[in-house]
Amino acid sequence: MSIDSSRAPVALASYDNSPDSLGRALELCEAFSDFSSHHHVMIKPNLVAWDEEFPIAPFGVYTTTRLVEDLVILLKDYGCRRISIGEGSVEIKKGVGTKAAFAGLGYTRLAERYGLELVDFNESKSKAFAVGDDLKLHIAEEALESDFFINMPVLKTHGQTRVSLGLKNLKGCLKKKSKKLCHHPELNLEYCFSHIADFIKPALTVIDGIYALEKGALHFGNAYRKDVIVASKDILGADLLGAHLIGFSGKDIAHFRHYAERRNQSLNLSDYDIRGEDPAAHIKPLKWDWIWTEDNTGPGIFAKMGITGPALPKYDDTLCSGCSPIANMANILVLSAFKGKPLPKVEVLNGKKMQGRAGYDQTVLLGDCIIRANKENGNICHALPVKGCPPAADQVAEALRTAGLDVNIGAYRDYMNGQSVKYQGKEGYESRFFAV
């Protein structure tokens, strides 16, 4: 099969000031060659989720508000009169979602200053698109109906998909039900969300690499100041270069392969017209995965500390963003219960397809999906279901106590508070990038 390699150019520029740095990148990739000032522009940043109780340190997690403002300034310079910003943030806690992220990251003021429209895709009407016989994606109408859709992901790795760039950022355009469906127990997560770009068809992808995040997302990754911008009218070309800058080949990424095969497109970066700076000068490999014990009974620190008894199998790609903080909470709470002696034989499961194993006295099931998946599981001696989507944190702690684990919720709160302030006072981590 011949591969089409005649693609739009991909630009790499250093970020050193606003808005000139972004302007250079857009000029290099000929971003506005098909643009009209009469177009309705939709900008889709990455505002993953918002947490009022344990604020998420923004570096590498969210698209920098500063770069979004730079883009708005440049669009206004081109005479654009109608600009919207849309996102569908995950609600870690009910009622705290996109609008809270807009307010907390300065988008409300940005909208007032430049006359922009803010759109919460979670509240939008949607259109349905069938992907084969087994998958239907419901996409927010506003994401589909704009004239010029600009995708603005962050440069980051991800514990389920290795990288989270342009293709994955479009998952925020899905309605809540479809987001969860992408974490289907039989269909692959990366196969599912790779199709969104077939329907939205972004006119431009700008990867914000002012900060890069290792082992994202949400509270737990580590951010690095990188000061690069990748831009292209070709979403896969942009993603390939972004992945290269953090140490990944395009062939390593399953959702790249799914998309490229459908588009008859090359996964070799050498087949693309890279303009601007030399990528070799900006490569910093980042880790994406978390270490787990060899017997899959918990994160690597369990083995280091000598924790025995409980089993918390590693999350899989069916674990939704809403439940991922709860899964991490369970790990920390079990750590808090360890006093140097063996703990009760308790297995803790999450996601949609894990199956309880024999040999455990009690099995804690975190969330409605995993409860259904183990309804007929004969290996489970005594189930402790924690209902919810996601379940409440206090109910998770109570279930672990019922299972015989003397967990300390204060230890979890201390850990989360530490994550919120971990960059304070460190050189290069500037809050001004996330304010207006």
Image (spheres, rainbow, N blue to C red):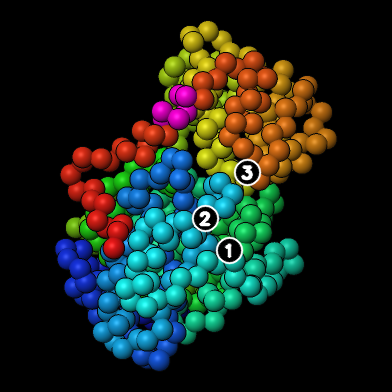
Residue located at (60% from left, 17% from top): 405
Q: Amino acid at mark 1?
A: Asn
Q: Which residues are magenta?
A: 410-415
Residue located at (32% from left, 50% from top): 59
x then y, percent, for residue 379: 77, 26
x then y, percent, for residue 346: 65, 21
| Left or right, 5 with reference to 185 | left
Disc 2 + disc 1, Cβ < 8 Å: yes
Q: Circle 1 is placed at which residue position?
A: 122
Q: Amino acid at mark 3?
A: Pro
Q: Nearer the viewer, residue 109 or 402?
A: 109
Residue 39 image-quadrant placement: bottom left
Residue at mark 2 to residue at mark 1: CA–CA distance: 9 Å
Q: Circle 2 is placed at which residue position?
A: 97
Disc 3 + disc 2, Cβ < 8 Å: no
Q: Circle 3 is placed at which residue position?
A: 390
Q: Which mark is residue 328?
A: none
Magenta stretch prevailing secondary structure? helix
Q: Earlier in the sequence, mark 3 or mark 2?
A: 2
x then y, percent, for residue 309: 60, 16
